[in-house]
Image (cartoon, rainbow, N blue to C red):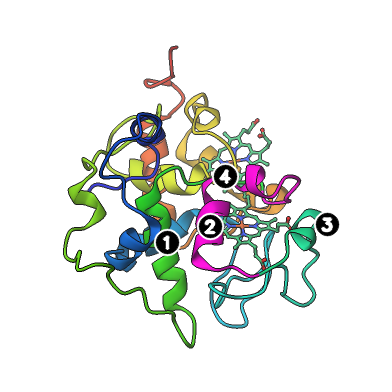
Amino acid sequence: MLFRLAGAGLVLIALGAGAAGAQSLEELLAVADVAKGTKVFKKCRACHTIEEGGPDRIGPNLWAVVGRPVASVAGYAYGDAMHAYGGSWEPARLDEYLARPRKVVPGTKMAFAGLPKPADRADLIAYLNQTSPEPMSFTPTNGKTGEGADAQEPEEADFGTLFDAPGVEETFVYCTACHSEMIVAQQGKTREHWADLFDWMIEEQGMAEIEEPDRSIVLDYLAANYNEDRPNFPRP
Ligand code: HEC
Ligand code: HEC
């Protein structure tokens, strides 16, 4: 299955050209795919838990965040910018924030570049919404049903400079939450040294433990494609 996370270029060009047929958030939510949203959320897991009563990590717990007042997790030390932003996380505000966090809340402590694709954000919001005890209902507007966002956008996998091989999707999702994939592609290490790097990332850089089987999938991918001989070293 193909997975779309990056590919910002295509979407931005389409918006810039004022393309007819660009779907509104309401339309995208009405046909959102919760299963895809679950996958998009893997990016967030580096810094957030979603389970009810889950611990805060680098970021606050996100249980029932859709519709929740901004900066309201007791005991989490939000930045001043987030407190000042105020209001609550209605779908439209979440959509805007997740597209470009540091543009929408200048000074936010959330060091995350953003999700450029509107369909990814809608799928993710639908997933977040489902974790609420009282989920909002996103009903189709003006009779438009059944036509997913995918009908408009060509499905295209885009994993940046990462070599396309089994495991690339998982690696891209986990390892670009905090920095670009370039920092990964420029390394060459044995499987053992990649595993050591994971430990360092967890202990020193705040990365959350990657659960199995994904941990092994990412390690196998890195060992196979970014080993000491650096067969896929990125060349500009
Ligand atoms: C690199 C770590 C990191 C990643 C990755 C990350 N976040 Fe965050 N997030 C934070 C931090 C830190 C804050 C607190 C921001 C502040 O106080 O300015 C935050 C705050 C938030 C808030 C505000 C919560 C509240 O209680 O008001 C939302 C919503 C949110 N993040 C959603 C997401 C989603 C969804 C993703 C994945 C697409 C994501 N974040 C990825 C670190 C991260
Ligand atoms: C929670 C955030 C976070 C996540 C997720 C994350 N990293 Fe990092 N990583 C960092 C930080 C912070 C640094 C150090 C600062 C920098 O160089 O940007 C770093 C640095 C690195 C470096 C450079 C190490 C060096 O010797 O200079 C590599 C390689 C790397 N990360 C690989 C990965 C891989 C592979 C993954 C996915 C399994 C990953 N990172 C996921 C935060 C993260």
In the image, which is nearer the foreground, mark 2 or mark 1? 1
Q: Is residue 206 left or right of residue 99?
A: right
Give the amino acid type for the residue marked by disc 2 in the picture.
Cys
Q: Which residue is denoted by mark 4 in the rendering?
A: 100
- The residue nearer to you, when weighing 198 against 121, is 121
Q: Which residue is denoted by mark 2 in the rendering?
A: 44
Contact flag, marks 4 and 1 (Cβ < 8 Å): no
| First-in-chain label (1 vs 3) | 3
- The residue nearer to you, when weighing 31 against 48, is 31
Ligand 2 quarter of the rendering: top right
Q: Which residue is denoted by mark 3 in the rendering?
A: 80
- Residue 224 place in picture, x, y as percent: 35, 34
> Is ligand 1 within 8 Å of the beta carbon of the residue shown at mark 2?
yes
Give the amino acid type for the residue marked by disc 1 in the picture.
Leu
| First-in-chain label (2 vs 3) | 2
Contact flag, marks 2 and 3 (Cβ < 8 Å): no
Q: Which residue is denoted by mark 1 in the rendering?
A: 124
Give the amino acid type for the residue marked by disc 4 in the picture.
Arg
